[in-house]
Every structure is written in C-alpha cells, then in structure tokens.
Image: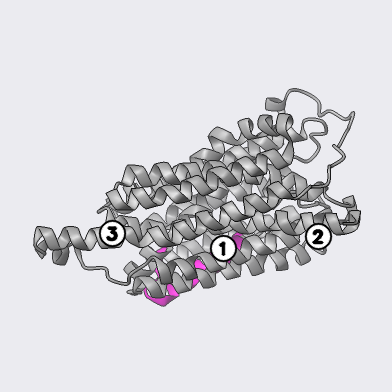
Amino acid sequence: MTAARSTTFAVGLITCLFFLWGFALNLNPILIPHLKKACQLTDGQSALIDSASYLAYFLLALPAGQFMKRFGYKGGMLLGLGLFALGALLFYPAAALRSYPFFLGALFVIASGLTFLETAANPYITGLGSPEGATQRLNFAQSFNGLAATLAPLLGGVFILSGNSPSPAALAALAPAARTAYLDHEAVAVQGPYLLIGGFVLLIALLLWRTPLPALAEETTDTVAEGGLWQQKNLMFGVLAQFFYVGAQVCVSSFFIRFAGSVAGFEEKQAAQYLAVALFGFMAGRFLGTVLMRYVPAARLLALYSVLNVGLLVLATTLHGTGAVYALLGVEFFMSIMFPTIFSLGIRGLGARTKDGSALLVMAIAGGAVLPVVMGHVSDASTIQTAYLVPALCFLVVLGFALRNSSVKHLTLSTAH
C-alpha cells in the first residue's frame, strides 16, 4: 500500500472512532427514560447515567495522555476500544439482574474507553496529513460524529424503547408478579443492542490492531506562554466555560424525551424521533458554523449563539405544547459549534503548554456528570420544564467567555466531541 493510500485508509479508520463515541454518548438520552422506567428511578437518580459517563473523562483524561506517551496513539485507541466493548457486554448481566448500580458501572467502563479514544483520535487525525488540511480532516470526522448522534436516538427508540409507559398508579395497581415481569421485560430490552455494539467495537479493534498506522511527526515549539499553566486566565476561563457548556449540552439532550412527554404529551418513541431531528440539526449546525466562521469571528459567533440559546430556553420554560419542543430543537442547532470553539479559544497562545491545557479542557467534560444531576433534582423539586433554566444559566457562562475573546479574528478548530 502506498503512503498516500495508507494515510487515506488510516483517516477512514480513525473516523470510525468518531462515529463510535458519538453513537455511545447519544444513547444516553434513550437510556435515561428507559432505565428510569425499568429501575423505577427519580429524575435525579436517572441523571446518574450521565454522571457515570462523563465522570470518566475527568478521572481518566490525564492517565490516557500518559498512557499514550508510553504506548502511542494506536495503543491508546486499542485500549479504548477494549474498554468500550467490555462495558457494552456488561449490559447483558446488568439487565438480567435489573441492577441500576451495575448499569452505571458498565456505563463508566464504556466512557473510560471513550476517554482514551477521544484523547487519541482528536490529535491523531489533526496531525495525520498536511497541516493545511487539518481543519478539513477534523470537520470530516465531525460529520460522522454528528451522523452517529442522529442515528443513536432513532435506533435506540426502535430497539430499546417499548412505547409502553404505564402511569405510576397503573403500575402500582398490577399484581407484584405482573409488575416484576413488566419491569424485567423492559430491562432486558438493552441486551441485544448492546451485545451488537460490543461485537462491532471488537471488530473495529481487530481491524485497527492489524492495520499499520502512519507515524506522526510530533509538533515541536520553543514558544512557552508566560507564567504557570494555572496562571493562564483565558485557559482557566475556557475550562470553566467548557464545564458549563458540556453540562448544558447533556442537560438539553438527556431530558429531551421526558420534557417532550411532559410538556407536549409526546409518546416516548415519537419523542425519540424528535430528538433524532434535533441532533441532526446539531450536525447541520456544525457545517454551517464552519462556513460562517470564514466571515464572522468565531468568538463573536459563539457569543451570538449563546444569547440565542438563553432566549430559546426561556421560551422552552414558558411555552406549552409543541412550541416548547421546537425551542429545544433550536437550542441543539445553536450548541453545535460550542465545544470545538471553546476548546480552540482556550488553548490559544499556550505554545509548549498546549497539550497540558488540552488535557484540562478534556477534563472539563465532567460538567456533563454534575449539571444533569442538578437539573434532575430541580425537576424532582418542581417540574421538568422549570429545570430547563439550569442549561440557560450555563450558557451565560459561555457568553462571558466568548465576550472575553471577542477580539480574536481568526481561529482554527482543533478538536471534536
């Protein structure tokens, strides 16, 4: 195989990894209402599904970077795929036991694998080929991440959600044996889909193991930002903004099905289809945002989108019926550019400290572990509609970071999530 063909094949294989982690993370909005029903949970308890997923990023981002310093990008990807497959296969016994802690443990193992995949795949695909084509390669990979985000709720809605959601009163009226049989039937619905996911991930791991990947020329720079890493005010603000952005993103998506059912009376399968449309809008927004950044400075676009999202979330908390659901569809669209834009603005000017700054920004994904739990408890104490004020407040932090960087005219996106 020629060097050019080898590089093209490697780009295609690494792009599959973007699809895999996008698919896994975007099954959470399906799992939250499904396991809430199967395991009889409150909104606050069901939000721990996100906590189990996103806590792994906080705990393992730095170890993943250290692992790859010793074993390389390919080693990190293979370990990530192995953990991903193991976590997916653990869903089988978790469902058989109908054990919510077991499910959370399996999700943490999956997310541990995703942490290694993201930590390895983002810099690898950026450096794989000419520097001039880095943004195009990243956008290409992002498109498959967005495709996975669209497909996950569609397929999850078909193969996991039953569409049978009796009210608490109706469920309580069932005989104990009938109630247990119903709940067990709901729980085991995840076994087949996650066995298939685990098998597919193992297949990709085998293909990656047998494929020689081109080595990257490591970036070298003598430039070092003045002061210690913790003294980089823009980076620290970026970490804070990323924490609140990821928290807001997860909040908006994870409770979408609950919101659509409560506010507009959508049945869960119908709501899952609307969620797929919303996540398609997220993908389309990334492409449009990339084009707009040629004409509008990235930080100013980030500020505009933040203001629009605050306004749309206020509408979502005050309107009733499908209008409120449509407002959330708009939020998904305007969230699209935020993760890579915050990331790239945050590491700007760090020089030789860029990798360390990048690790902190990856750790900030832990916002997805914390803020959905806060939102779940707000929902339990009030309503799911009122709880959507939580992501609205998060976007105000993103707005502040965008305004701080409003003088930045040119920006190259450097990561995808």
Where residue 226 sits, quadrant-wise, is top right
Where residue 382 sits, quadrant-wise, is bottom left
Q: Nearer the viewer, residue 394 or 165?
A: 165
154 on left or right of 166: right
Q: Secondary structure at mark 3?
A: helix
Q: Which residues are magenta?
A: 317-335
Whether residue 235 is visible, yes or no, is yes
Residue 318 magenta: yes
User: Is 192 placed above or below 229 here?
Assistant: below
Q: Which mark is residue 136?
A: 2
62 on left or right of 47: right
Residue 165 magenta: no
The answer to whether marks 3 and 1 mark residues whose Cβ atoms lie closer than 8 Å is no
At 40% from the left edge and 51% from the top edge, which residue is drawn?
91
Seen from this angle, which residue lies furthest top? 228
The residue type indicated by label 2 comes to: Gln
Whether residue 241 is visible, yes or no, is no
**Which residue in the protein does label 1 denote?**
149
Q: Which mark is residue 89?
A: none
